[in-house]
Image: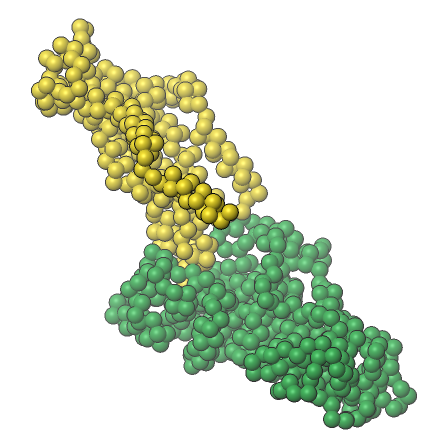
């Protein structure tokens, strides 16, 4: 009996490891599936990039080749000179940076307060904050528009900044509350007993320790606001106040033809900051979101 | 001058938990006071009130002759060592040590550096000066924490919250000895919280035994050990623990006192103050405490001092043996003797209801966890524990007689309060 069982076990195990024909087909299947996903995800962006490098003549021809026949940077230059893409970019930067700064400041204070005080309704407050994150934004556009119009704030930076806070604050407060909760109270108590006041303890001990979380919030806020289209479309009336995503709509549109190459060049320009941030800060973003133990 | 004085200090949390109940304690200048007690007895709360991290609900806290109830922690001249070190993780050891000095506004960098070097050398952590706390071992971290507390030179009060609790046992005894000699050389008033009675007895100038938020006993280690004020205090100190049993007192007309355990009796002769103290308890139950070292193998002593029982086990403990004798006594469950309610009642002043940032937990822990291996003074079973130098002659199952050293047994009333002491030690 022993011989039989040993042989059976051996052949079963070997079958799994043997590099037979079954193994090969499984591997090729896996990789081809993977290739499908990769191509499906990246192809649009690839197409945009090569289109942005094509000459206007090639676009006029309606080419469908996968590679640009003649690579040129003229589109990028045209965007900046003829189409005046710089103005919208600057607007985007102003709105994004302002919103991010405000978010970080407000969310840090809120997160610290929510993590340190013991209020009876705290789960309710946090839940309420989270509701703000999931609330349909389009539903808010109408009322906000009316309010801004009555206040005379339409087509101004503050209008957009305040509206974009709706994107960023709920998430930021939630993340930072979580992050601050993981910082042990003993740290501030140690600082206080060492002689700092409460505010000094916050500045010298808590903020440095919370920096990774704050960094994550900064990045996420920036990305969210930079990509905003809805609010910009609703509140910005004149072209000199358009943000970059908004500007793309009217970019490269002439009466007769749509210059996709110009549009795509603009898209690449807009995507660059986000891509760079994500590439360089990817580890930070993930660790900030998962917020590991401090000790 | 008295460095610290607590006068009737109480602490009530918002959920009604009475954490500290009318505590009256003093610590003189340069004294090493240990707050000893099981988990949840309020010792850490008292420490935090001295530091200013918890607000005093009622009563007065005096620091250096000044009422410090409303003084914020940064204005009190106290230094604190936390149980887990609480080192600043974003600073190196050098910066951690220098932190209190820089906060206090020490301008000269050279002086600060010299002082850091001095403290690091004194604690043996010079090699770690440029590392971050995350890279240090537990022992090194605690040393840095101690260094940070001591670096200001002369804090009026040094507070230590179970600094050795998170270390392994071997490291504990080494560091304990170092702490002891270090603090003695500095002569700074220290309040040390622990649940380990060995630490308390070896380090303290005075020990305060706490239970359920109130002081059970306070005095020098020798006094608290040899002359305990309550049954709880007797049970908490001493390893192996004291034998506690219920007994009834009978006074024989003018002849002496009989201590009746039910199955056996002891006779106390008349006339040494002990019997006079016990006379009022005629017919009433008392708690009798006999330390294992007060029992010796009988070589035929006076009849009234003999107890007999069957040996149930003889355990080897390395430096000694412990024998258990089945004597059929009624054991004492200390958890039922004189328990104090931990709920705030209308007789106590209201806890201030305010939003408290950072300091002051307005919510007490819901469950007071019991630590593993911790003493709550329970006495299991009706066995007597006896210390032996050698196990020769002690065989399990045989009946033996032991002599009780009468002057060294304790009598407590049914509430656990000592009856027979005539010591004049201050209980305060």
Q: Residue furthest right?
A: B253
Answer with the quarter of the image where residue B135 lies.
bottom left
- Compare residues B169 and B21 and report the one nearer the observer: B169
Rendering coords of residue A208 (x, y %) = 34, 51
**From this viewpoint, is residue A20 visible?**
yes
Q: Which residue is drawn at 79% across and 75% down?
A: B328
Q: Quadrant of the C terminus of chain A?
A: bottom left
* Residue B255, placed above or below residue B427: below
* Residue B78, placed above or below residue A154: below
- Chain letter matching colour green: B
Q: Residue at x 48, y 75 (%)?
A: B173
Rendering coords of residue A71 (x, y %) = 10, 22
Q: Which residue is drawn at 71% across and 60% down?
A: B341
Rendering coords of residue B115 (x, y %) = 31, 72
- Chain letter matching colour yellow: A
Rendering coords of residue A93 (x, y %) = 25, 31
* Residue B92, placed above or below residue A114: below
């Amino acid at each position: 009996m022993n011989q039989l069982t040993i042989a059976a076990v051996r052949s079963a195990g070997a079958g799994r490891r043997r590099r037979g024909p079954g193994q090969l087909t499984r591997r090729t299947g896996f990789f081809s599936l993977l290739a499908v996903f990769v191509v499906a995800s990246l192809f649009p962006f690839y197409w945009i990039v090569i289109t942005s490098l094509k000459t206007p003549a090639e676009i006029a021809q309606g080419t469908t080749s996968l590679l640009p026949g003649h690579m040129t940077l003229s589109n990028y230059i045209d965007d900046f000179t003829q189409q005046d893409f710089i103005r919208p970019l600057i607007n985007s930067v102003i709105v994004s940076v302002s919103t991010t700064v405000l978010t970080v400041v407000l969310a840090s204070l809120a997160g610290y307060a929510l993590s340190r005080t013991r209020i009876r309704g705290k789960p309710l407050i946090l839940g309420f904050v989270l509701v703000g994150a999931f609330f349909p934004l389009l539903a808010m556009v109408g009322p906000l528009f009316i309010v801004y119009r009555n206040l005379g704030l339409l087509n101004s930076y503050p209008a957009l900044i305040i509206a974009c806070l709706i994107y960023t604050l709920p998430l930021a407060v939630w993340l930072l509350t979580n992050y601050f909760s993981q910082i042990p109270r003993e740290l501030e108590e140690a600082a206080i007993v060492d002689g700092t006041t409460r505010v000094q303890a916050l500045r010298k001990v808590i903020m440095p320790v919370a920096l990774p979380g704050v960094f994550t919030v900064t990045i996420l806020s920036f990305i969210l606001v930079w990509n905003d289209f809805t609010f910009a479309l609703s509140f910005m009336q004149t072209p000199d106040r358009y943000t970059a995503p908004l500007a793309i709509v009217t970019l490269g549109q002439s009466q007769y033809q749509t210059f996709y190459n110009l549009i795509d060049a603009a898209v690449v320009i807009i995507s660059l900051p986000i891509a760079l941030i994500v590439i360089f800060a990817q580890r930070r973003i993930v660790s900030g979101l998962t917020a590991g133990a401090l000790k | 001058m008295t460095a610290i004085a607590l006068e009737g200090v109480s602490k009530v949390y918002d959920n009604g938990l009475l954490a500290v109940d009318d505590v009256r304690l003093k610590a003189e200048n340069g004294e090493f006071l240990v707050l000893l007690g099981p988990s949840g007895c309020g010792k850490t709360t008292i420490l935090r009130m001295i530091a200013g991290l918890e607000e005093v609900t009622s009563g007065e806290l005096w620091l250096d002759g000044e009422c410090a109830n409303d003084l914020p922690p940064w204005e009190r001249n106290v230094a604190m060592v936390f149980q887990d070190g609480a080192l600043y993780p974003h600073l190196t050891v050098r910066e951690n040590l220098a932190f209190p000095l820089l906060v206090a506004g020490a301008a000269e960098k050279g002086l600060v550096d010299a002082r850091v070097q001095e403290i690091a050398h004194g604690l043996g952590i010079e090699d770690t000066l440029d590392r971050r706390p995350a890279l240090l071992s537990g022992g090194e971290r605690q040393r840095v924490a101690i260094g940070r507390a001591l670096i200001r030179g002369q804090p009026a009060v040094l507070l230590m919250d179970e600094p050795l609790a998170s270390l392994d046992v071997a490291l504990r005894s080494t560091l304990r000895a170092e702490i002891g000699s270090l603090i003695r050389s500095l002569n700074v008033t220290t309040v040390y919280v622990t649940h380990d009675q060995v630490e308390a007895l070896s380090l303290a100038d005075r020990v305060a035994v706490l239970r359920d938020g109130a002081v059970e006993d306070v005095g020098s280690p020798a006094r608290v050990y040899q002359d305990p004020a309550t049954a709880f205090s007797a049970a908490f100190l001493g390893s192996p623990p004291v034998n506690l049993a219920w007994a009834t007192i009978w006074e024989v007309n003018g002849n002496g006192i009989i201590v009746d355990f039910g199955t056996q009796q002891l006779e106390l002769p008349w006339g040494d103050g002990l019997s006079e103290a016990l006379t009022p308890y005629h017919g009433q139950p008392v708690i009798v405490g006999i330390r294992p070292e007060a029992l010796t193998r009988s070589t035929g002593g006076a009849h009234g001092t003999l107890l007999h029982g069957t040996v149930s086990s003889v355990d080897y403990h390395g430096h000694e043996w412990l024998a258990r004798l089945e004597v059929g006594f009624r054991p004492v469950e200390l958890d039922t003797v004189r328990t104090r309610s931990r709920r705030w009642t209308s007789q106590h002043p209201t806890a201030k209801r305010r939003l408290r940032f950072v300091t002051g937990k307005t919510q007490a822990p819901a469950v007071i966890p019991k630590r593993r291996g911790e003493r709550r003074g329970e006495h299991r079973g009706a066995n007597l524990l006896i210390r032996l130098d050698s196990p020769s002659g002690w065989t399990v199952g045989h009946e033996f007689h032991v002599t009780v050293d009468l002057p060294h047994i304790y009598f407590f009333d049914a509430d656990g309060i000592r009856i027979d002491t005539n010591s004049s030690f201050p209980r305060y």
